[in-house]
Amino acid sequence: MTKHRWEHAHDWLDHRFAEMESDIQTQLMAVEVDDALITFQRLRTFSKELASQLDGDQIQNRFQSDMDADGFFDVLIKDEYPKGECPDCGEDIPEFATPGESCENCEHVFTESRPNDD
Ligand SMILES: [Zn+2]
């Protein structure tokens, strides 16, 4: 049986991540910020390549709680209101406002699919 440095492809992946982590650590300690950013971009490209092999369900199954915390499943209400404005005071509703949030100006509480509630 032949012997290889890495037994599984996952071990190689882990090695690549560890190598980039080590590079970033070294570069940051040497205050080589530009180099650290370049290494980070390599890490990002590498991760994107891996992620491209997953479908939406696989990503969601693995990262559901993180996605939830980031607001992935939140319903946005701005477009539910005429001109995207608060019905009470006319203040522009923030782009990512969700049901239950209130107007920063008058504290009107925004709701889903009920743009004309008084
Ligand atoms: Zn308002």
Image (cartoon, rainbow, N blue to C red):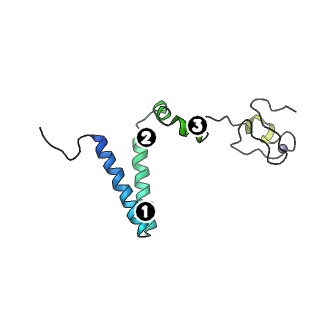
Q: Amino acid at mark 2?
A: Ala
Q: Amino acid at mark 1?
A: Ala
Spatial separation of the CA atoms under disc 3 and disc 1: 30 Å
* Residue appearing at x 28%, y 41% in the figure: 9
State whether label 2 is within 8 Å of ligand 1: no
The correct choice, above or below, for 64 with respect to 96 in the image is above
* Residue appearing at x 38%, y 56% in the figure: 21
SS label for mark 2: helix
Spatial separation of the CA atoms under disc 2 and disc 3: 18 Å
Disc 3 crowd rating (10 Å Cα; few below 14, some 14-19, many 20+) is few
Residue 15 left/right relative to 91: left
Spatial separation of the CA atoms under disc 2 and disc 1: 22 Å
Residue 68 - label: 3
- Outermost residue toward the left in this view: 1
SS label for mark 1: helix
* Residue appearing at x 80%, y 32% in the figure: 115
Percent coordinates x, y for residue 108 in the rendering:
83, 40
Q: Which residue is mark 1?
A: 36
Question: In this view of the protein, which residue sits in the foreground, 10 or 34?
Answer: 10
Which quadrant does the N terminus fall into?
top left
Among numbered discs 2 and 1, the one appearing first in the sequence:
1
Query: Are the residues flagged by discs 3 and 1 in contact, CB closer than 8 Å?
Result: no
The correct choice, above or below, for 30 with respect to 9 in the image is below
Image quarter for ligand 1 equals top right
Among numbered discs 3 and 1, the one appearing first in the sequence:
1
The correct choice, above or below, for 37 with respect to 3 in the image is below
SS label for mark 3: helix
Residue 113 - label: none
* Residue appearing at x 50%, y 37% in the figure: 63
Residue 51 - label: 2
